[in-house]
Image (cartoon, rainbow, N blue to C red):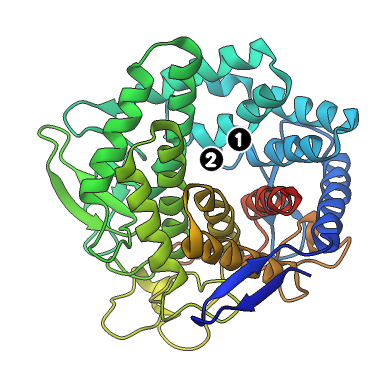
Amino acid sequence: MLALVATTLGHLQWQRPDHDGWIKTDLATAGEQISAMAQRIGDSSKIPATIRPDGSLFLVNLYDWRSGFFAGSMWYLYEYTRLPMWQQQARRWTAALAPLQWFTEHHDLGFMVYCSYGAGYRLTGDTAYKTILINAAKSLCTRFSEKTGTIKSWNSFKSWTNGTVHHYPVIIDNMMNLELLFFASQVTGDPYYKNVAIRHANTTLKHHFRKDYSAYHVVNYDSSNGQVTAKESAQGYAHESAWARGQAWALYGYTTTYRWTNDKRYLAQAKGIARYLMKHPNLPADKVPYWDYHAGQPGYTPCGPNAARYAQGTQPRDASAAAIIASALLELSDYSKGQEKQEMIAFAASSLQALHSPAYRSADGSGGGYLLQHSVGSIPHGGEIDVPLVYADYYYIEALLRLQQRQAKP
């Protein structure tokens, strides 16, 4: 197991273990479960997202925001094993997403295309993949507004507070789509895509964060003049609370943006978010957060009747947020030094070990073919509560590979 020891200052510090057996075990299990799931589905136009209450697979089509994660997990397994079988499977599920290069109806093309085609291009150099990625970047840029300086997320958002329908919502999740734009500028030499990404990152930096580095989920803009009209939440406990997965997207998004720009503002933001999450007083001991860091706490008005049902009592955990945070911290540690670096790796390793435990990881062959249990989609909307989620597995696999790479370093 990973060794986590207390320093003289009382902080956790990571020590390289003598073996990485549990990581290999989970990656092997991921291969078995994903292979069996793919065989059971058969049709690559049908993509697993979660499970229904009866335990059957809930499948989505390519236009769902989660469509790229299944193929992305296959590409990670190919990267890990180098088995031709995994490249074949990944290519098959990736090819089904080709029409997305022209999709302009929402902002999630980074998730949908970069997690699939982006990984495929990185691992194979297939020029056809590059063309699709560039086209997808063009499509994403059609949602950019010079007035707001942002990429529009959803076409509309109805407030939980008063039913107001906002027509230019931008959600913190959108930071995850910028990597597609940075990539497009890199391979084309055209700075436009990168400039759009930077404008969006800067505007988000200005309007989405509170002084403690926690992020609002939704910021609504007036498209005619770029002014902020409301700051709210769609999937969190309350408008002023810290929705766990939203904080994870913020951490990951600014870490990635720093990698592509080397702009110290983004590094400082990522580190501020990391400190907020790692030291939050409401973080459980196993470092797998509740679905919202303020769920059920006094002083926060729940978003709608479904969230209100969780005003008291035990709060669901979100394994997907834990996996995203762990993966982001492992990358962020590469841009950090000394005790700060060690604490990031230790935190990530500890949370991944918790996810590996029977408390979160499915027993082999169970969980509908997913690795992790106990994730949350959207409690306010009453959907996907305490279930496995395809993106939880994707980021868990990514984090395991990143942790293993650190173990392999001399």
Describe the element under mark 1 as helix, strand or loop. helix
Residue 89's place in the image compared with 373, above or below, is above
**Residue, x 10% and y 34% (percent of image)?**
225
- The residue that mark 1 highlights is 115
In the rendered structure, the answer to whether residue 340 lies left or right of residue 375 reads left
**Residue, x 58% and y 59% (percent of image)?**
326
Please rate how many residues cluster around mark 2, counting C-alpha atoms within 10 Å: few if below 14, some from 14 to 19, many from 20: some
Circle nearer the N terminus (1, 2): 2
**Residue, x 57% and y 30% (percent of image)?**
114
Is residue 194 visible from the viewing direction of this image?
Answer: yes
Numbered-mark total: 2
Viewer-closest of 398 and 45: 398
Image x and y of residue 4, in percent: 66, 74
Viewer-closest of 170 and 279: 279
**Residue, x 51% and y 82% (percent of image)?**
10
In the rendered structure, the answer to whether residue 158 lies left or right of residue 181 reads left
Residue 23's place in the image compared with 278, above or below, is above
Image x and y of residue 202, in percent: 26, 39
Is residue 378 visible from the viewing direction of this image?
Answer: no
Residue type marked 1: Cys
Residue type marked 2: Trp
- The residue that mark 2 highlights is 65
Label 1 to label 2: alpha-carbon separation: 11 Å
Viewer-closest of 12 and 167: 12
Please rate how many residues cluster around mark 1, counting C-alpha atoms within 10 Å: few if below 14, some from 14 to 19, many from 20: many
Image x and y of residue 154, in percent: 36, 40
The quarter of the rendered structure image containing the N terminus is bottom right
